[in-house]
Amino acid sequence: MTTTQEPLSPNDSWWSSITRARELGIVVGLVALVAVTASANPRFLSAQSLRDVLLGASILTVLAVGQTVVVITRNIDLSVGSVLGLSAFAVGSLVRDHPGTPVAAALLAGAGIGVACGLLNAVLVRYGGVPALVVTLGTLYAYRGLVHTWAGGGQITADELPRGFLAFADGGVLGVPWLVVVALVVTTAATVLLRDFRLGRELYAMGSSPRAAQLAGIRTGRNTLIAFAASGALAGLGGVLHAVRFGTVDAAAGTGFELTVVAAAVVGGVAVFGGSGTAWGAALGALLLTTIGSALPVLEIDQFWQQTIVGALILVAIGLDRLVALRAARALRKGGSRVR
C-alpha cells in the first residue's frame, strides 16, 4: 500500500498545508462532538469535566505516541497493555515498600521496565524473523501472565501508597495537571524526533519501503530495536501514570488497552501499513476517543455504541489514508510536484 502523503506544490501556502493536514478532520470532529454534547448538557464543559477528559486522554496519548513510532516502521506492538500492567504493579510495589522513592525515580523505573519488554519484542521480531503481530500477541499474554503470577490475586491499594506519589496526579504547573504536561512533553519530543532528525526520516523510509530502506543503507535492525524500545518505554511510563491516577493497581491493569491504543493511532491518521502519520495526530486520536467515551453518557447513548463508533472511525481513517495515497500517486505520475 502506498503511504506517501499528498504532494505539495512549491506555491502552497501555510493555509493550504493546514487544510490538507489529516489532523484537521480530527479537530473538526472533536469540536463538533464537544459542541453537540455541551448543548445537551452545559456541565460537560465544566472545569472538572474537562480535567477528567484530559487526564484520561493523557495516559492513552503517551501509549499512542509510542505505538505511532512502531506502526510507522510497518510493525505493531500489541503488548503495550500488558507492559502497562506490569509496570504499574512493579512500580506500585516499589513505592509501597520504599515510600521515600521520588516520583521521578518511579517514572524512570517504569520506563526502564518498558524498555526491557520492548527490546525483547524487538529482538524476537528482528532476529527471530517473526512478524511483529505474532511476537507482540505472544508477549501480551506472557507479560500478563507474569503480572498475575506476581500479584497472586492481590492488589495494591491507595492506602498503601505514599501520599507524595499519589499527589503527582493532583499537582501541576500553571493549572495544567502533571499527567497532561507529561503527555505534551512526550508528544512534542516524538514530533521533533520524527520530523527533524535523521532517525525519524529513516523510520518513515522503513515503513514506506523496507527493501528500499535496506538498499539505501539504513540500519533497519538498529532502528527496529529503537522503535520497540520507545514503545515499551512509553507503555511503562503509562503504567506509572496509571498507578498515580487510580491509586489501586492489580493484575488486570491495562487489560484490553492495547486495542484502544492502536485505535487512537489509526484514528489519528497513522497509516496502519507504515510510512505515514504524526505523533500529534495520535494524540488527537487519543483525545477524540476519550471525549467520545465521556460524551456518550451525557448524550444518554448506550456505551455499547462507543465500540461501534470507534470501529467506524477506524474504517473512515483507513479509507481516507487510501484516498490520500491514490491522489499522491496520481500527482507523482503527472510530475512537477514534490513530496513532503
Image (tube, rainbow, N blue to C red):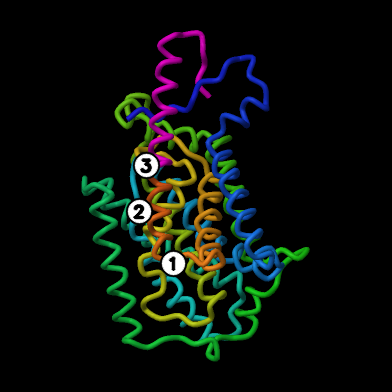
Can you say which quadrant of the picture contains the N terminus?
top left
Check disc 3 and give the amino acid type: Val
Residue assigned mark 1: 302
Looking at the picture, tell me which residue is in the foreground, 92 or 296: 296
Q: Are marks 1 and 3 in contact (CB under 8 Å)?
A: no
Along the line of sight, which residue is nearer the eye, 250 or 311?
Answer: 311
Q: Residue 332, image x and y in percent?
A: 43, 14
Point out the tag, 2 or 3, that comes first from the N-terminus: 2
Give yes or no for residue 209 being in the magenta stretch.
Answer: no
Point out residue 160 in the picture as x, y percentages from the top left corner: 53, 90
> SS class of the residue under badge 3?
loop
Q: Residues within 10 Å of mark 2 (few under 14, many from 20)?
A: many
Q: Which residue is mark 2?
A: 77
CA–CA distance in space, label 2 to label 3: 12 Å
Q: Is residue 327 left or right of residue 297?
A: left
Mark 2–mark 1 distance (CA, rounded to whole Å): 30 Å
Q: Nearer the viewer, mark 2 or mark 1?
A: 1
Q: Which residues are magenta?
A: 316-340
Quote the CA–CA distance across marks 1 and 3. Answer: 29 Å
Q: Earlier in the sequence, mark 1 or mark 3?
A: 3
Mark 1: secondary structure: loop
